[in-house]
Image (cartoon, rainbow, N blue to C red):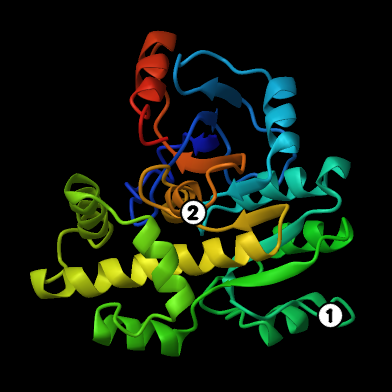
C-alpha cells in the first residue's frame, strides 16, 4: 500500500509533476508547509479508496508491518523532509535499512565520518540536492541506527542508458524490468508524466531515452531494496507510483512482500470535505 502526503499552500503550489504520485493513503496539510515546527496546522490523513480520514494509529500500524516502506518527497519542500525524519526516528523503524535515491547504488554511508562527508563518499551531490534540505532525513536514519545504502544509477550510467535507450542495462536490472514490463497504456502514462515534468518542451525524439532512464532508476532502486530487507526507500514521488514506479517493479518480482508508499505532495486548500474526498478517490488504481 502507499501513503501520499500532500501539502497545501498556494505560495508553493507549482504543478510539480516532474515528481509523480502513488498508492493508498494521503497525508495533507494546508498551512505553513515551509515551517520548521513539528506540527503544521491543517494536517490530516486520508484513505484513498474512501477519501475519508485515516487514523494515525492505523497508519503507523501499516507502516510498521511493511517489508518495504517508500517515503516520497517533493525534493525542495523542507516540510516533507521533516515529516519523513519523524517517521524514521520512530523506534519501530529499528532494524530497517535505508535505500536512498540521492546516493549511488552499491555504496553505503560510513557512519564513522561526519554526515555530509559520508554521504558524499556514497555519491551524494550536495549542490544538486540542495543540501541541507535532506539533512533531517539522513540525520534521523543515522541517529536511529539505520544503515544507509545508495539506490540510484550514477551520472555516467545515466548517460550510457540515455544514449543506448536502455540497451546498456546490466543483466540483473534488465531481468527485473522484463518481469515488470509496462503495457501500452502504462507506457503512454509514463511518457505523459515525463512530458508534463518537462513542461511539454521535451523533443519527441528524446522520449524513449527518458523512459529508459526512469525505468532504470526504478529498477536499480528496486534491486537495492530487495538486497536490504526490511527496507525504507528515500526517493522522489516520481518513483512511488503504484502503477509505474518502484512499487510496480516490486509487485511483479516479489508479490509476496508488503509495501507501503508514503507520498508527499502539494495542493491548494479544499473548499469542502466532499471536494477533498473526491480528490483523494481520484488516486484509486494509481495510488
Residue 142: x and y in percent read 83, 63
Work out whether residue 12 can be spotted.
Answer: yes
**Image vertical order of residue 59 relative to residue 138, above or below:** above
Q: Quadrant of residue 107?
A: bottom right
Within 10 Å of the Cα at label 2, are there few (<14), some (14-19), or many (20+) other Cα atoms?
some
Q: Quadrant of residue 173?
A: bottom left
**Dot 1: element:** loop
Work out whether residue 30 can be spotted.
Answer: no
Residue 106: x and y in percent read 64, 80
Q: Nearer the viewer, residue 86 or 184?
A: 184
Q: Which residue is mark 1?
A: 114
Q: Nearer the viewer, residue 161 or 223?
A: 223
Residue 188: x and y in percent read 18, 51
Q: Residue at x 24, y 63 (%)?
A: 198
Q: Residue at x 61, y 58 (%)?
A: 234
Q: Residue at x 20, y 52 (%)?
A: 192
The numbered mark at residue 253 is 2
In the image, which is nearer the foreground, mark 1 or mark 2? 2
Is 274 left or right of 107, judged from the image as shown?
left
Real-space Cα distance between discs 1 and 2? 37 Å
Q: In what quadrant of the picture does the C terminus appear?
A: top left
Is 190 left or right of 233, judged from the image as shown?
left
Disc 1 to disc 2: CB gap under 8 Å: no
Q: In what quadrant of the picture does the N terminus appear?
A: top right
Q: Nearer the viewer, residue 11 or 227?
A: 227
Q: Residue at x 9, y 69 (%)?
A: 204
Residue 259: x and y in percent read 59, 42
**Dot 2: element:** helix
Q: How many marks?
A: 2
Within 10 Å of the Cα at label 1, are there few (<14), some (14-19), or many (20+) other Cα atoms?
few
Amino acid at each position: 500500500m502507499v501513503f501520499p502526503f500532500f501539502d497545501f499552500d498556494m505560495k508553493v503550489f507549482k504543478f510539480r509533476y516532474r515528481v509523480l504520485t502513488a498508492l493508498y493513503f494521503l497525508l495533507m496539510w494546508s498551512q505553513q508547509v515551509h515551517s520548521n515546527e513539528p506540527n503544521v496546522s491543517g494536517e490530516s490523513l486520508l484513505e484513498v479508496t474512501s477519501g475519508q480520514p485515516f487514523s494515525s494509529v492505523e497508519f503507523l500500524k501499516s507502516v510498521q508491518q511493511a517489508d518495504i516502506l517508500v517515503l516520497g518527497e517533493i525534493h525542495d519542500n523542507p516540510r516533507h523532509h521533516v515529516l519523513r525524519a519523524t517517521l524514521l526516528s520512530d523506534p519501530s523503524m529499528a532494524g530497517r535499512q535505508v535505500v536512498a535515491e540521492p546516493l549511488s547504488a552499491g555504496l553505503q554511508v560510513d557512519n564513522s565520518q561526519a554526515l555530509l562527508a559520508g554521504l558524499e563518499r556514497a555519491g551524494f551531490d550536495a549542490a544538486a540536492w540542495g543540501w541541507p534540505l535532506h539533512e533531517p532525513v539522513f540525520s534521523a536514519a543515522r541517529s536511529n541506527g539505520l544503515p544507509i545504502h545508495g539506490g540510484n544509477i550514477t551520472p555516467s550510467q545515466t548517460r550510457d542508458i540515455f544514449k543506448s535507450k536502455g540497451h546498456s542495462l546490466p543483466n540483473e536490472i534488465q531481468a527485473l524490468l522484463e518481469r515488470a514490463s509496462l503495457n501500452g497504456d502504462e507506457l503512454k502514462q509514463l511518457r505523459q508524466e515525463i512530458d508534463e515534468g518537462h513542461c511539454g518542451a521535451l523533443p519527441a525524439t528524446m522520449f524513449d531515452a527518458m523512459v529508459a532512464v526512469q525505468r532504470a532508476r526504478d529498477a536499480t532502486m528496486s534491486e537495492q531494496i530487495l538486497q536490504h530487507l526490511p527496507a525504507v526507500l528515500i526517493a522522489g514521488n516520481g518513483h512511488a507510483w503504484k502503477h509505474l514506479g518502484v512499487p510496480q517493479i516490486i509487485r511483479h518480482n516479489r508479490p509476496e512482500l508488503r509495501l507501503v508508499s508514503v507520498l508527499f505532495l502539494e495542493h491548494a486548500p479544499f473548499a469542502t470535505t466532499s471536494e477533498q474526498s473526491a480528490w483523494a478517490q481520484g488516486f484509486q488504481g494509481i495510488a
